[in-house]
Amino acid sequence: MKNSTNGMSASRKILALAVIVGLGGLGAYASVSLSTDDKTPLASATSSTHSAHSTHLATASTTATAWGSNPLQLAQATAQPAEKIPAINQGVNTVLANNAVTAQIDMPNDFVPSSAEGSTENSPFARINLDELSSGQRAITLLASNLDAVAQWYGMSSDGLKQLLLSDSTVHIDKKGRLLHIDSGVTAAGDVMNATTTATTTTVAASTSPFPLDQTFKLHTKTNSTRLLYLNFTGFGKNPAFDLDKAPATFSDAERLLIQKVWLRVAEDYAPFDVDITTEAPSVVTGKIGVMILITPQTNTAGGYAYVNAFSTYNPNASPAFCFPNNLANSEKPIAECVSHELGHTLGLLHQGSTSTEYYAGQGDGETGWAPIMGVGYYKNLTQWAKGEFTGANNKQDAYAIMLKQGLSPRVDDHGGTIASADAMSSTVANGFNNVSASGIIEVPGDVDMFSFNAGAGAITLKAATAALGGNLDISLQLLDATGKVLATSNDAATLATTLTATLTTSGTYYLSVTGAGKGSPLQTGYSNYGSLGQYSITGTVPMAIAAPAAIVLTTSATEGKGPFTVSFDASKTETTTLKIWSYTWSFGDGSAAVTSTPNVVNAMTRHTYTKAGTYEAVLKIIDANGKTNSKSIKITVS
């Protein structure tokens, strides 16, 4: 085997992120260890070499790094202007298929894409044998009497399929009648991206890569999921490995870093879903539903292609989706946008276009400049799943409903959304402040994650950050008191992250809600909260809570009597389920020795006999679990 240029090290656990979703309830998030790292294409996925020492991140593990400790992300670096990327050809009905790319499309004849309802039973494709892969009117002509059956399989009317073929030149029918998109790439002669100040990315050196570089081909988001999206950079069959440096035998540090950053971006796009985004070929495929997408250089003009509804029983010997990085400027963002886009096709999604273009390029500017993932994502910083809410949209598909039918479900909610179900924020005391933190994922539109924290009176600052690479979540925060009254809100109009500041007037328990927000009107330059899903992390400082001492509840059997007079004292109701008492000290006022409880025997009740006539003051002193002291006295009269 040809080794990587940065060498191979022993398999080791990488504690690089907080996995809830436990990222609360996720199980292991990232599995990273040694793998086959050379660029020799695999004859098949089942023949690849796999390390027997794969390690997994523990659910509760959190390690702060330069990339942060968010649930599905390792990135929290300072945003910098994006590099200029050549523009994509957006012309309507541009003919993208050419002899080079169509000749490379070679899916097995027995491959059956799922129906619109997610079934592979009774498909029409076995009986279909067309002369060529085709598009537009040619595809309609070749389908002939099979057109109705193919349209029905994909959940369309016959006229609907005809209209799709005639209006979107990227839509093709292969020789077996199966639907696929051949998507355009970045054209070197095109206009450069005109917004170096309006799109952001994160630039880091290899020395601060998200994961150790020798772990690049062992990255996972959710190893316990039965759903799988395998990002294959290592080559497969006749398809070569990803290559930037014309050194096909090994992966350089720069190549590994770019692969990790592409993976992070794609992982964020699919963070809300119960699916494992991985760079490692699965060693066990039994029970797995999903697809492999090849990121491989090819000699053609396409950016990538994918079969519609290919997300089905995982086939390690075929790839229904491709991205061609050499036609995507060999750059992190366009490659990642292509991968998420083509995988969207395998999950049943068609293009988000308009009446004037096959791919909608988005709207707005800056960090919140927006585009649909199933349109053109190269020009805007914020790309999200969409349902055609922008002006002139020609596709109103509910992306989540379509993907659900194809077998991709949202993750189980990681945090409750009410005060009663709130999860306590992590808390660390330092420099006289309570430093609080939390992380999570907004899984569905309208999802609310609620957290609680204790604070004293004074100023608080709570900062919410989304994924630093390709964040999809526009974060909105609310601060509430114990009654549910909203004390403060925060949603920065210019950024996806936001900071909430407030001044608390009293000590107590407070609550922070996190949800996804929209911006302005999707019919103009904004977007709704439909696609505002993904990872977030919360950090902040709040004043130390100055708790009042426990209130003493003291009763006696009697306060007056003839000597010798025995009195029973009872303070058992002083302790509550939320506040424990560490010690009780009883002084009876008659010169007898005080009685003090021990750590193992807490005397909330006691008895004392007064033998001489007189008036005495019995005193109870307590120390509670917060270290606070309190006392209470009661007069005893003996005749």
Image (spheres, rainbow, N blue to C red):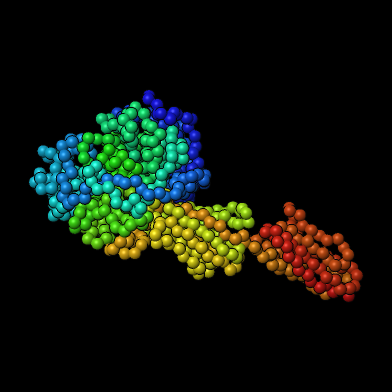
Q: How many marks?
A: 0
Q: Residue at the right extreme? A: 612
Q: Residue 226, can we see it?
A: no
Q: Residue placed at 28% from the left, 55% from the top?
A: 362
Tell me the quarter of the picture where residue 185 sits: top left
Is residue 579 shown above or below 77?
Answer: below
Q: Quadrant of the N terminus?
A: top left
Image spot of residue 294 (x, y percent): 29, 37
Q: Residue at the top extreme? A: 1
User: Which residue is nearer to you in this view: 232 or 162?
Assistant: 232
User: Which residue is nearer to you in this view: 544 or 559?
Assistant: 544
Q: Quadrant of the C terminus?
A: bottom right
Image spot of residue 584 (x, y percent): 75, 61
Give the side of residue 525 with respect to residue 455, left or right.
Answer: left
Is residue 127 shown above or below 449?
Answer: above
Q: Residue placed at 83% from the left, 70% from the top?
A: 617
Tell me the quarter of the picture where residue 336 sits: top left
Q: Residue placed at 34% from the left, 39% from the top?
A: 231
Q: Residue 101, can we see it?
A: yes
Q: Residue placed at 41% from the left, 36% from the top?
A: 216
Image spot of residue 331 (x, y percent): 32, 41
Image spot of residue 515 (x, y percent): 42, 59
Is residue 465 shown above or below 266?
Answer: below
User: Which residue is nearer to you in this view: 515 or 399?
Assistant: 515
Give the side of residue 599 with respect to residue 334, left or right.
Answer: right
